Amino acid sequence: MIIKHTYLQDQGFTIRTIVSNALSGIKDAFPEIPYQYCQFHQLQRIKHLLTTNPRLSASKELKALAHQLTQSSRLDFQKSLEKWEQKWKDFLQEKSYGEDGKWHFTHRRTRSAFYSLKRNLNALFTFENFPVDQVPRTNNAIEALNSVLKMRLRLYRGLSKEK
């Protein structure tokens, strides 16, 4: 079931912003509402791509830069990201040939991590456009509530998904 924000407004809700852990779907459903991409989930994406202990210098630097996300302003983070991109420009463009004779980018995971940060940059700092503490950087508060609800529902085994 797709819920339009007019339905929610009819129920007395006012949606000022959306803080979410995914960019597709909900952002598209509410294009006129400011969207904040959860910084924690962005960092999880970087960790997934670069691993906990990256071996390559470029990946190590990018991971360290990503961890500055939660303490940075958009402008500072963007400058740091651009500086990293300039330093590692040639590295990002390196290509290798596979057994089938076709080329691919050699450092795909580092490229993916970098372009994820670059692509999501605007949505990662939406909170800066609002008064302090009005829009959170992460959706951790609701995630914590959801985990408690999920745990309680698991304890009550007779409850169906519909109920």
Image (cartoon, rainbow, N blue to C red):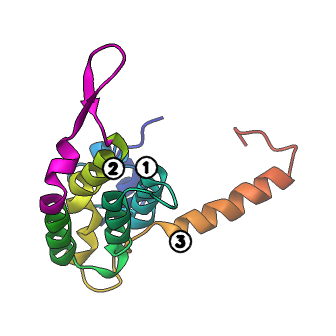
Label 2 residue SS? helix
Is mark 1 in CB contact (under 8 Å) with mark 2?
yes
Q: Nearer the viewer, residue 69 or 50?
A: 50
Q: Nearer the viewer, residue 40 or 17?
A: 40
Between disc 1 and disc 3, the foreground one is 1
Is mark 3 in CB contact (under 8 Å) with mark 2?
no
User: Could you tell whether 144 is left or right of 130 in the image?
Assistant: right
Tally of marks = 3
Label 1 neighbourhood size at 10 Å, few (<14), some (14-19), many (20+)? Answer: some
Residue 33 shows up from this direction: no
Above or below, comparing residue 127 to residue 45 in the picture: below
Q: Residue at x 40, y 63 (%)?
A: 38
Label 1 residue SS? helix
Give the mark nearer the N terminus: 1 vs 2.
1
Residue 96 shows up from this direction: yes
Q: Find disc 3 in the rendering and name its residue.
A: 141
Report the Cα–Cα distance between label 3 and label 2. 30 Å
> Which disc, if any, is residue 110?
2
Residue 93 location, quadrant = top left
Report the Cα–Cα distance between label 1 and label 2. 7 Å
Amino acid identity at mark 3: Ala
Furthest toward the bottom, the residue is 132
Quadrant where the C terminus sits is top right
Q: Residue at x 37, y 72 (%)?
A: 137
Magenta span contains residue 99: yes
State the image coordinates of residue 36 (x, y, percent, origin top left).
31, 63
Q: Nearer the viewer, residue 157 or 52?
A: 52
Span colored in magenta:
85-107
Label 3 residue SS? helix
Q: Nearer the viewer, residue 6 or 43?
A: 43
State the image coordinates of residue 71 (x, y, percent, origin top left).
33, 81
